[in-house]
Image (cartoon, rainbow, N blue to C red):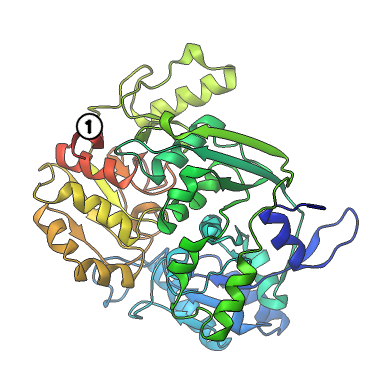
Amino acid sequence: MKNPKTLFDKIWDAHVVTQEKNYPAVLYIDVHLIHEVTSPQAFTGLKKRKIPVFRTNRTWATADHNVPTKNQHLPIKELLSRKQVEALVKNCKDFSIDLYGLGHPWQGIVHIIGPELGITKPGMTIVCGDSHTSTHGAFGALAFGIGTSEVEQVLATQTILQYKPKTMKIEVNGKLKKGVVAKDIILYIISKLTASGGTGYFVEYVGSTIRDLSIEARMTICNMSIEMGARGGMIAPDEKTFKYMKGRQFMIKGKEWGKAVAYWKTLPSDEGAKYDRIEIFNALDIEPMITYGTNPGMGVKIKSQIPKLKFQKNNSEKKQLRKSLEYMGLKEGQKMIGQHVDYVFFGSCTNSRIEDFRLAAKILKGRKKAKHIEAFLVPGSTQVLRQAKKEGLDKIFKEAGFELRGAGCSACLGMNEDKIPAGKYCVSTSNRNFEGRQGPGARTMLASPLTAAATAITGVVTDPRNFC
């Protein structure tokens, strides 16, 4: 094929409005998702300049970061959270933007509701003032997070100034072992490439392992691309993608559906397309993973030991490891298996979909959590919550001693009422384990829904294969 292109290049080239040499491209944006945290200043900027939102039909809003997950019908207790949510309500009303706020049947985490409502489609450019916008790349979309000033830019013009990133292909082949799921795949990749290994790149995931994943599992992979420093992650659309999308609320319907699918089938990277970097992994090398440090790259196979200082490449890495272990209260060379845990949190835009809850329920069914464990599940959307109840998963969770709450970002980050107390250990299905991420002094260990469920039962870090 003459001039073969990658999936990324095809979408990028189709959305460049204009491009001047040595300057960023003006990129057209198909979908702009907003929430209460990064939008207030942007709306203030529009009001000061007396500028309307250019295309309200390309903008969708929801409340997720600051919302409580208990008693959502009552006023928000935290002052800052309440003000931000109230500001979103007012701004959306003032600028005629559809808002799925608290009490709305479609409310939820912005990166959960986009795909489940059919807003997310292959070939699109999608932005949001949130780094985990890369989640939408699982549908073959070019999706990335933006800053508040850029949120204002997109609201005003439906375009954004962007330098074109480099491309990386990450290929994973082979059949996954028992007890290994999508979260383990991405934590393994990040542990190998480091938390900065993808800086400057947009990643495309390929290979038989990726193709075998469900769409919701692919979202988990793309979601955490940002955790290795990448600009975003994406997976080419296929028949699984089309089946998942068909019939959803805002999805293309009728005769136009066939035309859309025909176009989407042209999006996968052409044979011979060039990437700036290629990384290849074998699925058989991947095992259940868990983090021990204060960035997502500090992860190990669950039966492995924490690395020792003497094996670090340089003084900078030694300093980082020493600092992380001091914060986490862990020791070099320590085994993660058997490490005491206080909290188990299921949720976040990484692992709060119905498939994640089904994974947890398989292990929890007929069992109970350890008495000292505080365990709660927070669905990514009200639709996920309804589906969980429809399938009877809520009963399984209740009998296991878990609390099933309302939709929101919850304990993924300390911006709402769901915080982990200082010094306490939490095994979390979220995406970040930074210092204070889940609350001041909180100690976070990232893991899959299977590992989190197994750990809740025993009260210590546990290999999920013991229960699979």
- Indicate the position of residue 269 as horizontal and vertical percent values: 67, 53
Total numbered badges shown on the rendered structure: 1
The image quarter in which residue 329 lies: top left
**Which of these two is toward me, 394 or 215?**
215
The image quarter in which residue 21 lies: bottom right
In the displayed structure, 393 sits above or below 233; it is: below
Residue 411 appears left or right of 152: left
Residue 172 appears left or right of 376: right
- Indicate the position of residue 409 as horizontal and vertical percent values: 38, 60
Callout 1 secondary element: loop
**Which of these two is toward me, 64 or 210?**
210
Can residue 45 be spotted in the picture?
Answer: yes
Q: Residue at x 29, y 65 (%)?
A: 69
Which residue of the protein is positioned furthest toward the right in this rendering?
21
- Indicate the position of residue 94 as horizontal and vertical percent values: 56, 88
- Indicate the position of residue 12 as horizontal and vertical percent values: 73, 61
Which residue of the protein is positioned furthest toward the top in this rendering?
310
Q: Residue at x 31, y 25 (%)?
A: 303
**Residue kind at label 1, given as amino acid type:** His
In which quadrant is the C terminus drawn? top left
Residue placed under numbered mark 1 in the picture: 340
Q: Residue at x 43, y 77 (%)?
A: 248
Can residue 124 be spotted in the picture?
Answer: no
Q: Residue at x 38, y 74 (%)?
A: 107
**Which of these two is toward me, 158 or 242?**
242
